[in-house]
Image (spheres, helix red, strand yellow):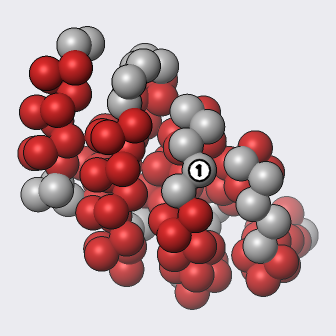
């Protein structure tokens, strides 16, 4: 994908819904699009403002995508950690796994987040 296409996506992404942002981040990572930092910056900035509207899967998939791309946006990751903790009851095993992997790959060790994930996993796995 050319840089002009990525720039067009970046300008449009600021109006995307949480699901659209998560899907876009996932697609960037799945396709391993190079030169996508500006697009990922836009996704992170837009997502931070709307994280309370993100479902568990949106949070996990966006975090997974950033980890695949090795895009470490600390303000986004800290906001995701807080939102995940507050909505941990909505997380299933797959979302917990993706979230754990993403934060580990990016070397972000948020103790309250890890504790919430561990507790929720224990509940789910009995």
Find residue 27 and report its horizontal and vertical position in percent. Answer: 37, 29
> Which x, y percent locates residue 109?
81, 66
Which residue matches tag 1? 72
Vertical relation: 51 (above or below) 71: below
Of all residues shown, which one is farthest toward the top? Answer: 1
| Total marks in image | 1
Seen at 47% across and 29% down, the residue is 29
- Label 1: element kind: loop
Point out the image quarter for the C terminus: bottom right
Taking 117 as reference, is 67 left or right? left
The residue positioned 83% from the left and 77% from the top of the image is 111
- Residue at screen point 42% across, 19% down: 34
**Front position in the image: 111 or 23:** 111
Q: Judge by depth and name the residue closer to the eye, 118 or 106.
A: 106
Is residue 98 found left or right of 40 in the rendered image?
Answer: right
Residue found 71% across the figure and 48% down from its top: 106
Q: Is residue 125 above or below residue 94?
A: below
Q: Is residue 120 visible?
A: no
Q: Nearer the viewer, residue 1 or 50?
A: 1
Q: Is residue 18 above or below residue 94?
A: below
Q: Which picture quadrant has residue 28?
A: top left
Q: Quadrant of the N terminus?
A: top left
């Amino acid at each position: 994908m050319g840089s002009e296409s990525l720039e067009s996506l970046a300008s449009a992404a600021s109006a995307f819904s949480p699901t659209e942002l998560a899907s876009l981040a996932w697609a960037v990572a799945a396709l391993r699009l190079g030169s996508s930092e500006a697009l990922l910056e836009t996704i992170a900035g837009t997502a931070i403002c709307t994280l309370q509207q993100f479902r568990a899967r949106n949070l996990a998939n966006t975090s997974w995508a950033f980890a695949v791309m090795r895009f470490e946006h600390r303000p986004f990751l800290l906001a995701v950690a807080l939102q995940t903790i507050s909505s941990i009851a909505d997380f299933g095993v797959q979302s917990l796994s993706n979230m754990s992997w993403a934060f580990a790959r990016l070397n972000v060790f948020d103790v309250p987040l890890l504790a919430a994930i561990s507790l929720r996993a224990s509940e789910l796995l009995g």
